[in-house]
Amino acid sequence: MKEFASVIVAVVAFLVTAALGYVVIPFLHKLKFGQTILDIGPKWHKEKQGTPTMGGVMMVVGVIVSLAVGIGYSYFTKGAFFEELKSPFRLTVLLAGLVMALCMCAIGFFDDYIKVVKKRNLGLTAKQKTFLQLLVSAAYLATLALAGMNTTYIPFVGDVDIMHGFGLVFWPIALMFIYGFTNAVNLTDGVDGLASAVTMVVACCFMLAAGMLNNSAVNVLSAALAGACVGFVFWNAKPAKVFMGDTGSMFLGGMVVAVSFGVGRPIMLIFAGCVYFMEAISVMLQVAYFKATKKRLFKMSPIHHHFEMSGWSEDKIVMIFSLVALVGCFVALLPLIFNF
């Protein structure tokens, strides 16, 4: 029954997220929660000035409602998803991941709210955002440790003990891993439909991984994320009727981290999330290169803006970056496919 639960959850997440656009977008217009476009961005982005932001709440509701439906369906059909949730460890991992993503979403919401109220692209300070994100990340990792997570899988090595000896280095690395990928997803959200399209591909990757590992909880959670992303693309594809804002991008960042830790293989996200990684690295390289030479390495960063400034259309960027994500996901799945 777990396959049917995943399908139902994905469909419900899509329908709820897409349907909410008819209510949320007019409401955001009424509140005048429009995006302020930075002057340093591409000049043609100025035409997007005033497009409603904080639309990420649509995906949040879509994921939560679909999960509730999935639990109910699995309960009445005695499906694997509900049976798996009887395991304290699996239940804790699922809830901890969802709560972590919601907390990241809340940080993004406050950031967006400050931006909207002050009508400028400056929300929480970098220090404030970093502190809150690290706090949420640490709480999430502590919950996983207390729940009994004591190994992580590394290809060609196998399960590695992370509670003793050298394995303890996993935890500080994991802390920066969560912080880094959450912000990397946020950086990816700069072109209509990009972050949601790429995350849909990544979510499908972890849905397959969870299926191969007989992890129904993460399989369904990934399905909910994928469905919500497709539902949001319905409104966010060029020309975007709404932006997800930090509210949505940080929620997506938290969710992809949650599913990667949920399958016990966060290392998969390095490959499956190669687009996020590429976006974040491009910003760091741009800053470092400019400080050293007073010249720009890229025409603009994150990297999607470089291609945009080079003449690529937003639709082409979304398509190519999604294909790159697809290749990365295939590489991430190879250890599972060939059992190494």
Image (spheres, rainbow, N blue to C red):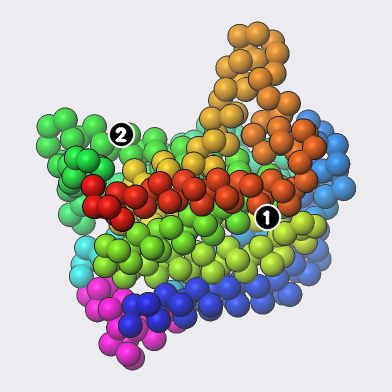
Question: Compared to 140, does 58 lie above or below?
Answer: below
Quarter holding the N terminus? bottom left
Amino acid type at image mark 2: Pro
Left of 189 or right of it: where is 153? left
Residue 259: x and y, percent?
38, 57
* Residue 9 can be seen in this image: yes
Q: Report the disc number at residue 72.
A: none
Question: Compared to 123, does 17 lie above or below?
Answer: below
Residue under pointer 1: 193
> What is the C-alpha distance between the residues marked 2 and 1?
33 Å
Residue at 34% across, 50% down: 334
Q: Residue furthest top?
A: 293
Q: In this orientation, which residue lies closer to the viewer: 251 or 12? A: 12
Residue 290: x and y, percent?
65, 15
Mark count: 2
Q: In this orientation, which residue lies closer to the viewer: 133 or 257? A: 257
* Residue 91 can be seen in this image: no
Q: In this orientation, which residue lies closer to the viewer: 144 or 4? A: 4
Q: Residues within 10 Å of mark 1 (few under 14, many from 20)?
A: many
Instruction: Tell me the chief SS of the magenta region.
Output: helix
Secondary element under disc 1, as helix, strand or loop, is loop
Where are the magenta residues, as a range? 68-86
Q: Report the disc number at residue 172.
A: 2
- In which quadrant of the rendered view does residue 208 lie? bottom left
Residue 307: x and y, percent?
71, 36
Secondary element under disc 2, as helix, strand or loop, is helix
Q: Is residue 272 magenta?
A: no
Residue at 73% across, 26% down: 299
